[in-house]
Image: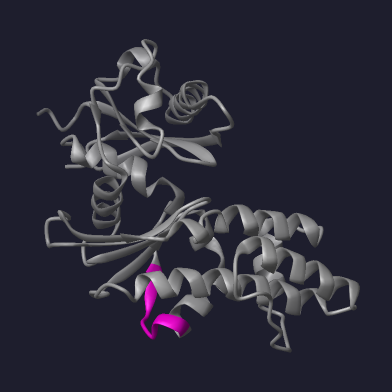
């Protein structure tokens, strides 16, 4: 396969749909839009935005590769993906492409979190995903930011300023949200609440991740990988050092392209 072709990767997720444009190993453009209730429309919008970011037209593309939970829902005529890649395979390939020394990726997504190990070629070896009761942690994080009147980035910075360890529910995210509201009404410091909800979320990710061997190097992907508070808690809980890949939200989209023979 001609590695100098323009290829697009689409990652149709629960919360956002991401698009990446690549030529060989070069990432030319990328974009993300909310998936909402129409994955196909979101995929078209993300692709068009990524094409504009890359400065090329859709006619220049030599192939589109789809991944993500809604990958089968974006097989619209206007998109016509050349291939479909399971999200676990795409995550492993994408993480390995971005860090060739890595052997494990922990992906903290908006609705699902998962961990994958892979070999020296980026081929998937093992995978584990959260159980149903731990779905929606990223959505929970967004809701908590809104509740505190800050952005997700500000929530992370706020958590880093915490001086007192307080706890929220050990059950589900709904109970944790209720506890956080109670703490606010009791006058708890916003930084301590931000840290508590961050720790609650990361505890579930860490508990899942340690159910499989965590082979070094370990990298973190997903939008929440950008939170330093999340990374700090994760390293403490799994007792391992981790690094964050560049463009952590786009690991799956990149991996889709790589799985199709791009990225070389």
Residue 70 vs residue 31, the one in the foreground: 70
Q: How is the image coloured?
A: one colour
Q: Give the image location of residue 38, x and y in percent.
A: 53, 24
Q: Is residue 87 magenta?
A: no
- The residue shown at (46%, 53%) is 112
- The residue shown at (60%, 76%) is 170
Quarter of the image where one finds residue 230:
bottom right
Q: Give the image location of residue 148, x and y in percent.
A: 80, 62
Left or right relative to 144: residue 210: left
Q: Give the image location of residue 81, x and y in percent.
A: 29, 22
Report how many numbered discs are placed on residues in the image: 0
Range of residues picked out in magenta: 237-243
Q: Give the image location of residue 50, x and y in percent.
A: 46, 30
Q: Quarter holding the C terminus? A: top left
Left or right relative to 43: residue 22: left
- The residue shown at (24%, 75%) is 213
Left or right relative to 249: residue 162: right
Residue 91 vs residue 250, the one in the foreground: 91
Quarter of the image where one finds residue 86:
top left
Q: Quarter holding the N terminus? A: top left
Q: Is residue 242 magenta?
A: yes
- The residue shown at (46%, 68%) is 205
Outermost residue, left side? 1
Residue 136 lies, with reference to residue 158, above or below; the image says above
Outermost residue, bottom side? 164
């Amino acid at each position: 396969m001609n590695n100098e072709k323009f290829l697009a990767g689409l990652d149709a997720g629960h919360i956002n749909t991401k698009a990446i444009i690549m030529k060989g190993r070069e990432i030319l453009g990328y974009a993300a839009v909310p998936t909402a209730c129409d994955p196909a429309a979101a995929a078209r919008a993300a692709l068009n935005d990524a094409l504009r970011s890359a400065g090329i037209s859709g006619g220049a593309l030599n192939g589109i590769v789809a991944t993500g939970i809604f990958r089968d829902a974006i097989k619209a005529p206007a998109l016509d993906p050349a291939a479909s890649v399971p999200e676990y395979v795409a995550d492993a390939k994408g993480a390995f492409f971005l860090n060739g020394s890595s052997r494990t990726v922990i992906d903290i997504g908006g609705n699902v979190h998962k961990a994958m190990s892979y070999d020296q070629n980026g081929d998937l070896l093992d995978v584990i995903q959260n159980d149903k009761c731990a779905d929606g942690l990223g959505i929970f994080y967004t809701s908590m930011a809104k509740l505190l009147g800050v952005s997700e980035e500000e929530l992370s910075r706020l958590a880093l300023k915490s001086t007192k360890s307080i706890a929220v529910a050990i059950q589900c995210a709904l109970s944790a949200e209720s506890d956080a509201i109670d703490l606010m009404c009791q006058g708890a410091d916003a930084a301590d609440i931000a840290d508590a909800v961050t720790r609650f979320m990361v505890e579930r990710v860490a508990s899942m991740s340690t159910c499989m061997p965590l082979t070094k190097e370990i990298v973190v992907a997903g939008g929440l990988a950008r939170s330093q508070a999340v990374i700090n808690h994760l390293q403490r809980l799994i007792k391992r050092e981790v690094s964050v890949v560049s463009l952590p939200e786009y690991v799956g989209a990149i991996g889709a392209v790589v799985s199709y023979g791009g990225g070389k």
